[in-house]
Amino acid sequence: MMKKFILIVCGSFVGAFLAFMFFMIAAMIMSFAIMGSMNMGGSKSTAVVSKHSILHIDLGTDISERGGNDAVDMLSLLQGGGMPNSLGLNTVISAIENAASNDKVDGIYIECNGVSAAPATLQAMRRALKEFKKSGKWIAAYGHEGINQADYYLASVADSIYLNPVGAVDLHGMASVTPYMKKLFDKVGVEMQVVRVGTFKSAVEPYMLEDMSDANRLQQEHYLGTIWKEMLDSIAADRKLQYAALNSLCDSVIITFKAQELIQNKLVDKLVYQNEMEDILRARTKVDKKDDLNYVNPEDLAADLEESASGDHIAVLYAVGEIDGGSSMATTDEGIVSDKLCETIYQLKDDDNVKGMVFRVNSPGGSAFGSEQIWKAIMDFKASGKPVAVSMGDYAASGGFYISCCADRIFAERTTLTGSIGIFGVIPCMNELIENKLGVHMASVKTNENADMASMGKKLTPAQFAALQNMVNEGYELFTKRCADGRHVTQDSIKKIAEGRVWDGITAKQIGLVDEFGGIREAASWVANKAKLGKDYKTQNYPAIEDQFMAMLDKYMVTSYESRLKGEMGLLYDWHKQLQRIMGRDQILCLMPEGEIEF
């Protein structure tokens, strides 16, 4: 028997070792294959910009927070999927700014191919394009097949919008669709035991209600309506249209309009085919018809944003994604690992060359514990006498606001989603599913009354539920106190606008959660002024971008970890991942057997 056991163990070890070696060899081969087309060390190749160049912004991509920060998906490469198709917001804005002052760049060509980005990211890009127009240079936009709503929001800045004669424009307004799953859980025999503080804390509603609550509907109607009006106001102003008339058009299923109708309604300026569009660009840049257009990509024209700054500078620290509670094994492509982020903050605090910080937050929340640790690190950074400004991205909600609230100054886009000052926990009880539907009896032996508390096959007792609710209440008290101290107001005034309610940037400024509108550039200017660095201040992005090959290895190590986790958690893990894909991580943050409390 012992001999058989040893053989099994040795066999497992050899199998694991061979699998690891195979992976390492495959990874090395793949790395050599792609080294010629990727940035392995974070250095930026210098493009030669010739006279009469055009900054070409292809919107057929995802807009991420930071360029050059995507781990390579080796499996996708092996299947012919190519390199990651994303563009950093910082890269785009830097390229637009440099194009305005570069005498060799005549204008900007926006190719509408279905951009994927949230309103706040689009607004930051749009503001940069508006600023570019002050240089007197032109912007042209073209839809080869069609122009979706996000594309059009950017394209409306252009001097002229061109469209293929059989193309379409899609403007339809904004909507939020949330699946409510209580009936499903009832059918399969799962009860979601929810503890929370905050009438508007809606992330738990799909587990406990069959339809949207009045409070949740109210908050969504408010922030969606405000964001939509902000976007439509901008489009109407640049296209010289009346807001009411444009909004009425959006109710008319614009996507079905014939192309000529789009011209009549002043949504586009001219119908042209691709080759004709290229001739228009040649005429604008004085390039002969037989010659190629001189396109430059944003990556070619952007400053080297990751180059080490020498001497005194402002740190731009990125905190993007869900706050994971300090785990060294992040399970998302983008996530805030609180212990690593805190380590970086303390390094910046002790760096004499760092004179201040812009804390770039784009997070829907996450772990309460992790948020508190990051808050403490920011407070310690401030205590060193260095100024801190927060620049909010698409979201700085719940835990995202927790880590932002103590900054000296908070900047946000008008379309940022923030607030959501509330707290909740979800503990699934699967007793009905396990015992009655699957026929599995969960027998237990325990030394103490609460030893098996929160196990999947056991319902919480009234005393246990009350204890957890009390813990959530205490967490809410701490959260609102942090916000009150950071915003220099009373805790009661924070509680009046808290209750887990999500606010748009415009309303957040009105109620005191935000100080100014703007992005990283505006926040950096404010910090530079406070730090007395002058107008020629320098910035440097943190944390340093990982080597792409190491990021690829890390990604697959995490995937291996997730596989083990899936084996241990089984069905519940599958549900968790499916719900995340359906609803988005900001809508489902906690569905784990441990019942970790998350914002």
Image (spheres, helix red, strand yellow):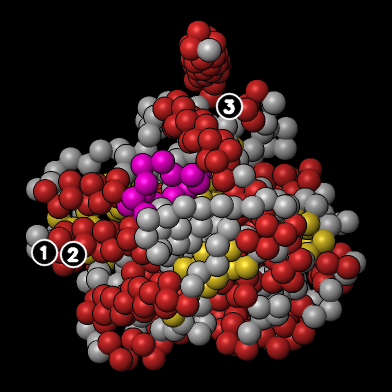
Image: 148 above or below 48 = below
- Contact between marks 1 and 2 (CB within 8 A): the answer is yes
Residue 515 visible in the snapshot:
no
Report, in whole angstroms, how far the alpha carbon at label 3 lies from the one at label 1: 44 Å
525 horizontally vs 318: left or right: left
Nearer to me, 529 or 61: 61
Q: Residue at x 22, y 79 (%)?
A: 485
Which numbered circle lies on residue 12?
none
Cα–Cα span, label 3 and label 2 = 40 Å
Based on the picture, tell me whether residue 328 belongs to the magenta stretch.
Answer: yes
**Nearer-N-terminus badge (3/2):** 3
Q: Nearer the viewer, residue 171 or 324?
A: 324
Q: Is residue 401 left or right of residue 76?
A: left
Q: Which residue is mark 3?
A: 74
Residue at x-position 45% and y-position 58%: 452
Magenta highlight on residue 591: no
Q: Quadrant of residue 434?
A: bottom right
Question: Closer to the camera, 400 or 238?
Answer: 400
The residue shown at (38%, 34%) is 546
Work out whether residue 195 or residue 58 is closer to the camera in this orientation and state it.
Answer: 195
The location of residue 35, given as percent across then percent down, is: 49, 20
**How far across and how far down the image is residue 105, in percent?**
50, 46
Q: Secondary structure at mark 1?
A: helix
> Marks 1 and 3: in contact by CB < 8 Å?
no
Disc 2 is placed on an element classified as helix
Task: Tell me where the magenta segment starts and ends, as one range.
Answer: 325-338
Measured Cα–Cα span from mark 1 to mark 2: 6 Å
Badge number at residue 383: 1
- Displayed quadrant of residue 470: bottom left
Residue type at mark 3? Answer: Met
Q: Position of residue 343 (x, y in %)?
A: 23, 47
